[in-house]
Image (cartoon, rainbow, N blue to C red):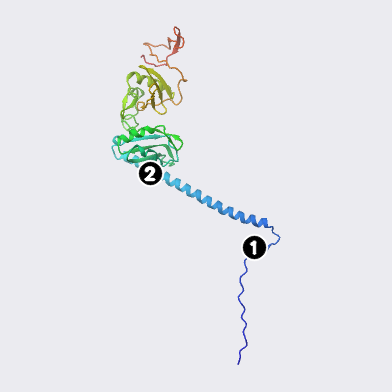
Amino acid sequence: QALPARRFAAPRRASPAPSRRDRDPSLPQSMADDAALAAGELSAADAEIEEMQKKVQEMEEEAEKLKKLTETVEEEAADGIDREEVDKRSVYVGNVDYGSTPEELQEHFKSCGQQINRITILVDKFSGNPKGFAYIEFADEQSVQNSLLLNGSLFRGRQLKVIQKRTNVPGFIKGKGKGKGKKSFAQIMKHKFQIMLSGDYKDYGEEEDNILKQAYLVGQLNARFHLRGQYYEYDFKNMSQKNLGSGKARTIRPPYGMTQPKDPLLPPGVIIVVKVPESPGPSMEIGDPNNPGHKITVAIPPGAQPG
């Protein structure tokens, strides 16, 4: 017996969800386009925020790395490592851009020697922000002398200050216990200005030392004087001496602990140095440097000592 034929209907395909325009034919095409554009802009903003967060995280990681380096240096000092020997192979680098990395400094100083043992960018303990200076430790002392030639070189658009690192001298730094306070001004004045000769710092002679101290302590950044037939120019900002006749420049440094006034005590110009007489009064007469044969009166500071 033949069974009745059964009819099978093909399954219906799901219709796509009507768009906002399909649901509301009256919606202009421009408004639909604006909605799509806004969605794209939101996605781009999210990507930009994510990129900024990534950069902030990288900066925080770099600051933490610099902070650990600083703490390591301090721990070594506390452990009694021979800092004097290390400092002989190290230089101070000032005016370092705050965004600098040890790798960038290594690239800048790589021509100075075969090996750089360590680069330390000092950071603030609490904020982790760089302080704007660094120390570079080389494997040998000759590399230090080579690196001094980079004093004044440009790094990240800034002019670097490169000088040999000093070891803290006992008695010149504040310490605990008796006899470890800061040296008095009179004690600092017993030490002399020094100049780099043949790879080592040497004391200036008495006459040059007196002139340099007088010019330095007035607070001006530059000084010139004529001595023994030579004209010299001094730059106290970059700590250099230049012979104006030969053009040769050398590195100098002031006595340890001696600093310039925050603001110049006198305006730029010729400085006349005089000795305080015995039994000084409130003033004294000296020859007028601008009018030979004439006298001018200068005040004597209270408490000034004869000589």
Kindly identify which numbered label has been placed on residue 68.
Answer: 2
Q: Amino acid at mark 1?
A: Ser
**Measured from the top left, where is residue 111 in percent x and y?**
36, 38
The residue that mark 1 highlights is 19
Single out the residue that lies furthest toward the top: 293
Q: Residues within 10 Å of mark 2 (few under 14, many from 20)?
A: some
Kindly identify which numbered label has been placed on residue 300.
Answer: none
User: Decide: marks 1, 2 in contact (CB < 8 A)?
Assistant: no
For marks 1 and 2, the one nearer the N-term is 1
Single out the residue that lies furthest toward the front: 246
Q: Is residue 229 left or right of residue 29?
A: left
**Measured from the top left, where is residue 60 in percent x and y?**
44, 46
Give the residue drawn at x 36%, y 19%: 210
- Judge depth for marks 1 and 2 and give the one in front: 1
Q: Is residue 6 left or right of residue 210?
A: right
In the image, 267 versus 263, the foreground residue is 267
Answer with the quarter of the image where residue 172 lies: top left
* Residue 140 sits above or below residue 266 on the image: below
Give the residue drawn at x 36%, y 42%: 71
Quadrant of image for the C terminus: top left
Give the residue drawn at x 43%, y 23%: 222
Single out the residue that lies furthest toward the bottom: 1
